[in-house]
Amino acid sequence: MNYRNIKDLNNVILKNLSIIPRDFDLIIGIPRSGMLPANLLSLYLNRPYTDLQSFLNGHIYKAGARSQFFDISEFKNILVVDDSVASGSALKQCKETLKPLSAKFNIKYCAVYVVPGKQKLVDYYFELVPLPRYFQWNIFNHTTLEKACFDIDGVLCLDPSPEQNDDGEKYLEFILNAPPLFIPGCKIGTIVTSRLEKYRKPTETWLKANHIDYKELVMLDLPDMEARQKANNHGEHKAKAYMKKPYILFIESDYSQAIEINRISKKPVLCTENFEMIFKSESILYNLKSGKHLPFLRRSALQVRDKLRLLNLF
């Protein structure tokens, strides 16, 4: 699995910005995934931008208002931008739409991410990224979410405050009226939560009210919050449910739990706390963040310091 978040998108555009000629007069984004990179390119190239339909209707985005722009003397060279090219069908459709205007405008095409072998479909691209892949800006509409596990609190809805989390009336009120966060636009696989089994009915009521279509709801079968806190096995509970299914992704809100789920399951976990994809929790980065190997690192640092002192360099 290949994953890119908005930070990656921004970085790859900045790193490769020089490949885009500076004679473009207008940037057009292909809705809706192409609007984000089009906006960034417009910003960095200091050029106006618009979406495909607005362009066809003769409008351009300007500060405070839209204005007519079909003045060929002002806008001649056009760069059409999408976030990615996979099969190329969407891009081909866009080209067909703009074909009648090819005599009036010099139109070039750009995609940030391209599947290897599809480079010739565009004039400019920034990175080759093979399938399968996920992007932060459209992951909640990805059809493969039927093969994914979702946490509830911090993902589908806001986390309860300490005051609301009383395992009583306030918590029940929270469950029934929790503000939604990341609501998927397609059916998802299994919802796995550390909420107690006794809250299943109000949880199902909230899920239905927020139009969340899912296959299964797995909850924690313990009597009360005290027992849940004593068990303290949130990551393990979620990882076990993840491992029981042939799923390819778990979406979790808490970074430490995301690390634990990945460590146990050995499968990818997307953390909505920072929208990082965790592939291998036993990596050096994880060991540094967790402090797991700090004693070794401390000893190594001291040994280096002592050697430098011997050489009068410290």
Image (tube, rainbow, N blue to C red):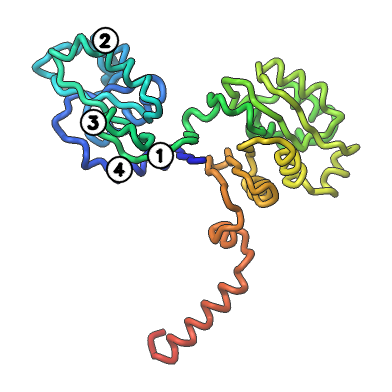
- The residue at which mark 1 appears reads as 129
The amino acid marked with disc number 1 is Val
Density class for disc 2 (Cα within 10 Å; few <14, some 14-19, many ≥20) is: some
For this orientation, the residue located farthest to the left is 73
Instruction: Tell which of 1 and 221 is nearer to you.
Output: 1
**Horizontal side, residue 182 vs residue 8: left or right:** right
Return the disc, 1 or 4, that comes first in the chain's sequence: 4
The amino acid marked with disc number 2 is Leu
Between the residue at mark 3 and the residue at mark 1, the CA separation in whole angstroms equals 17 Å
- The residue at which mark 3 appears reads as 123
Instruction: Tell which of 77 and 114 is nearer to you.
Output: 114
Return the disc, 1 or 2, that comes first in the chain's sequence: 2
Return the disc, 3 or 2, that comes first in the chain's sequence: 2
The amino acid marked with disc number 4 is Leu
Q: Are marks 1 and 2 in contact (CB under 8 Å)?
A: no
Q: Secondary structure at mark 4?
A: helix
Density class for disc 1 (Cα within 10 Å; few <14, some 14-19, many ≥20) is: some
- The residue at which mark 2 appears reads as 56
Between the residue at mark 2 and the residue at mark 4, the CA separation in whole angstroms equals 29 Å
